[in-house]
Amino acid sequence: MFLSDSDNELRRCSSVSTVSSPLKPASNKWEQSPLRKRLRYASTPKKDSSSSGPKTRKTPSTPHKNTPKRKQQAESQQVEANGGEADDGEKWRSVEEEDIEPPQPRFRPGRCAGPQLNRTAHYTPLELFQLFFSATVIDTLVKNTNAYGKIKHQAQKEKWVPVTAADMYSFICLVLYMGLVPLKTLKEFWRGSELFRLPFPASVMPCRRFLAISRSLHMNDPAVEAANDQKKGTPGFDRLCKIKPLYEQILEACCTFFHPHQHISIDERMVASKARIGLKQYIRNKPTKWGFKLFVLADSVCGYTINFFVYGGRESEPTGKGAGYDAVMRLLDIPFLGKGYKLYVDNYYTSPTLFLDLLKRKIWACGTVRSNVNGFPKTMWDNVPEKTPRGTIKWIRKGELLFVRWFDTREVSMCSSIHKAYNHDVAKRKVKDSDGQWTVKHVPIPGCIKDYNRYMGGVDLSDALIGYYNVLHKTHKWYKTLFYHFVDIATVNAFILHKEMCKLQSRPMLTQKRFREQLILLLAEIGSGPNRANVASRYRATIGRRACVVCKKKSPIYCSTCHKTLCITSLRNCYSEWHRSNNICHSDTE
């Protein structure tokens, strides 16, 4: 019993640090007793057999401060752990240290840069637009729209009237007109009130005909879509099946009729949509945050859309090098592109792996880069103070790639295979002097950032040109949203071709508004006007007419005696029916 009580007492004593009592001093015999030593050794955790030194109990201690000597030792250990990555050749250097300028690429395009057209001919806006919406494209739209319209109108009283190529041109004409003169609803374009008196839409196509084509508009064959729906949930299912024929035809035309200049850029584009479909994406830093995401390759100078694809989810066979890497390689997969191009991208795409692989294809690149991307210098030898002066430049060259850090209002990191670290360029910045007055100060700026700001906006320029007269309006079907965007791409690319041809021929160019106005008028001429023979009889002669008092449909016939609008057609005779029902003799009416 004595041994058990003693063990308990000793365990309690060993769990706390020994404190000498002011009333009774601690006994030295107990400190040197074999039982105390045995308990002390038992309470100390065992170390590995390889460790040497006396086995003494370690008491908790306060952490050491990060003194400069201890910090330097930690950095040295980190460098050793990184395999010596941060050696003398990979320190962040300043502008006082001269960088070696890399050899500049020799621009060798596969075709002559610019429009791939007869450079002595004068093209009308309609002819340029028909490069993208050719007769083949129109025939595809007419065929698939008629196929879907017949299926949709089987259970309805009103039969489907087949759409012709002229009807489709009139439909596209009004779609472009609605982007030029926007209203809240489609039916307001045909209202005859004083506020909404627009004679042009009714002169091109009746409201009912336009709405019928709009509801039945289809880009793919319904039979192909039904077969694709059977594959839902399998790898063979195509999420973009509904837009595929027109999508491929527009894409081919974009690549065919224009060859980009040396500076090109890649960025995302958002097409606004609230459709409840998995294709809809969210990008936080875009003005249009919800919609369909497109990856776009554009000319940095004029904004021409060279290549693009709609993002439909993860690729079935990714390369494993990132979604940005796969998107760039897919957009640059143009056989006749050529060599010596300078590509500008943002930090979503930039990676040392991508830039080195592009160099193998003779394409140089520049872009902002994230500091946590694989391949970014991980050196710990960073002598940048906390309050860095504005315009400070730090750089590291790793083989063929240059990494630059520039300190403006915030730090910007760049990666480039084109530029030298510093070419004595300056940027103007407004700063406050000691008296609190705003002054202009010239601060150093790296050449890669200067060129990035100049050439990165190719896709943004294209988005701006589309946004001025956007034809997009609300629809119930997600694929119609992309149809309207394809119309926008075709119109803007046609306008850019017009400007480039005017530059080559040294003649005055049209503004985009004037270009669209001429295009709308030319489309209306080749379209199916209300008085054309290929329009159904019930849609003829209804411009600005009153409604029949019997059938409520528009009619040009007016009884001057009864002061009533009545109609006489091959299908009905409301004129006689109304007079007989009201016991009015026909001889009394005119």
Image: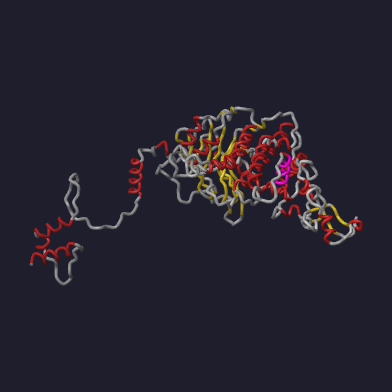
Residue 256 makes an appearance in the image: yes
Residue at 73% over, 43% down: 170
Question: Percent from the top left, x then y, of residue 447?
Answer: 55, 38
Magenta span: 166-175
Q: Nearer the viewer, residue 32 or 333?
A: 333
Q: Nearer the viewer, residue 354 or 404?
A: 354
Question: Percent from the top left, x then y, of residue 239?
Answer: 53, 43
Does the magenta run of residues contain 46? no
Please tell me in which quadrant of the rendered image residue 258 appears. Answer: top right
Does the magenta run of residues contain 174? yes
- Asked if residue 574 is positioned above or below residue 511 in the image, the reply reads below
Which quadrant: the C terminus? bottom right
Question: Percent from the top left, x then y, of residue 310?
Answer: 56, 42
Which quadrant: the N terminus? bottom left
Please tell me in which quadrant of the rendered image residue 426 appears. Answer: top right
Q: Nearer the viewer, residue 345 or 40?
A: 345
How was the colour assigned to the protein in this rendering? secondary structure
Q: Nearer the viewer, residue 522 or 138?
A: 138
- Asked if residue 433 is positioned above or below residue 317 in the image, the reply reads below
Residue 289 makes an appearance in the image: no
Left or right: 324, with 271 as reference point: left
- Asked if residue 174 is positioned above or below residue 10 in the image, the reply reads above
Left or right: 215, with 352 as reference point: right
Question: Percent from the top left, x then y, of residue 320?
Answer: 44, 38
- Asked if residue 199 is positioned above or below residue 261 in the image, the reply reads below
Residue at 18% over, 70% down: 22
Please identify the dominant SS of the magenta region: helix
Which residue lies most toward the bottom here? 23
